[in-house]
Amino acid sequence: MRTLVKISLLLAFCVIVLGAYTRLTEAGLGCPDWPGCYGFMSVPTQEHHVAEAQMRFPDAPLEHHKAWNEMIHRYFAGTLGLLILVIAVGSVLKRRSTFDSKSTPKKLPLFILLLVIFQATLGMLTVTMNLQPLIVMGHLLGGFSVLSLLFLLSLRLEPYRLGGGDPELRKYRGLALFALLVVIGQIALGGWVAANYAAVACTELPVCEGNWTSQLDFAGAFSVPEATSYQFGAHDYDDRMTMHIMHRFGAIFTTLVLAWLLFKCWRKAQSGFFRRSLAWVALLLTVQISLGLSNVIYSLPLPVAVAHNAVGALLLLSLVALNYNLSRKA
């Protein structure tokens, strides 16, 4: 069970990275249908299949590189779903066949399975609703949720490590939980920015160019305008600039909260285990800030933008681990 969960965890991370790559290469509609691609279970490559695909979807010209980006993402996501199904079924069977029924979580694997089913539904709606921003952001958050819960399941399946459950740090559980929620909120803001193509709405630092304060439009920024397709965005510049600004302010607030948490915990940490855990949070936060700044300075280069998603996921996992270890008894 532990091995399956670890494989699934790695696969879930790959799915998030591939999802970011698919979105950033404008391949979200690389296949205009779901779950196949132009009516096939793979990208059509033979000449008569390509002709048939174009007849089925005359308004969606086949671009092979984008279609492959989308289908590879779906293949990985589908494999992850099957593995999680095996884990959920295995957890139920193991609970029934062992005397120590409390040693194997059952509710968490079943909840992850339900979440994956919901995530698949969002994946379908992402395509059928032409990248509607709320659906895209929900799909992104769903992927991060699956990753986090798999990581939590992995932690619960591992025996307690020496140095865990430091009683001196337990009083910071509330602050650690607040920091985790702040990171989740910042990821949601980043997802909203990405879903609305607002990542390069501001090209200057530290805030934005020109008279940006007079152009803020919060009502427009957090609404969904009517459109036949949301590819490349449907909001005007003021809306996108507001999204971008809010994500930057969110990054500042997140940094301050995490810095305060690290400062408070580091002073009281008595074990190398917790100091290493705090060091990982600090390192990932520093890298994430650097990647965010690089996205602005270098106008969203693809490797940096994908890495920004990946490190955001790792930062989230580091907060999940810290909360888990702070909450358990020694």
Image: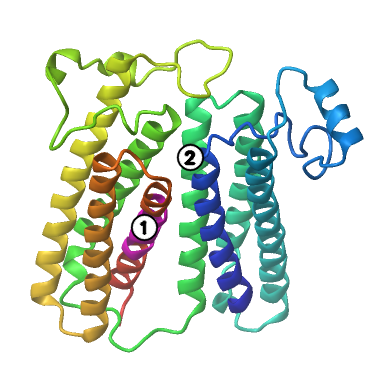
Q: Which residue appears farthest toward the right when viewing the image?
A: 48
Q: Nearer the viewer, residue 192 or 49?
A: 49
- Which range is magenta? 309-319
Q: Is residue 252 left or right of residue 202?
A: left
Q: Which residue is mark 2?
A: 24
Query: How many circles with numbers are drawn on the protein?
Result: 2
Magenta run includes residue 314: yes
State the image coordinates of residue 205 (x, y, percent, origin top left).
Answer: 15, 37
Tell me, yes or no, whether the two marked residues, 1 and 2, touch with CB atoms within 8 Å.
Answer: no
Q: Which numbered disc covers residue 311?
A: 1
Of the residues shown, which amino acid type is indicated by label 1? Val
| Residue at 39% from the left image edge and 16% from the top image edge | 235
- Name the element at disc 2: helix
| Residue at 14% from the left image edge and 13% from the top image edge | 214
The majority secondary structure of the magenta stretch comes to helix
State the image coordinates of residue 107 (x, y, percent, origin top left).
Answer: 58, 60
Q: Nearer the viewer, residue 58 or 41?
A: 58
Residue 297's quadrant in the figure?
top left
| Residue at 22% from the left image edge and 37% from the top image edge | 248
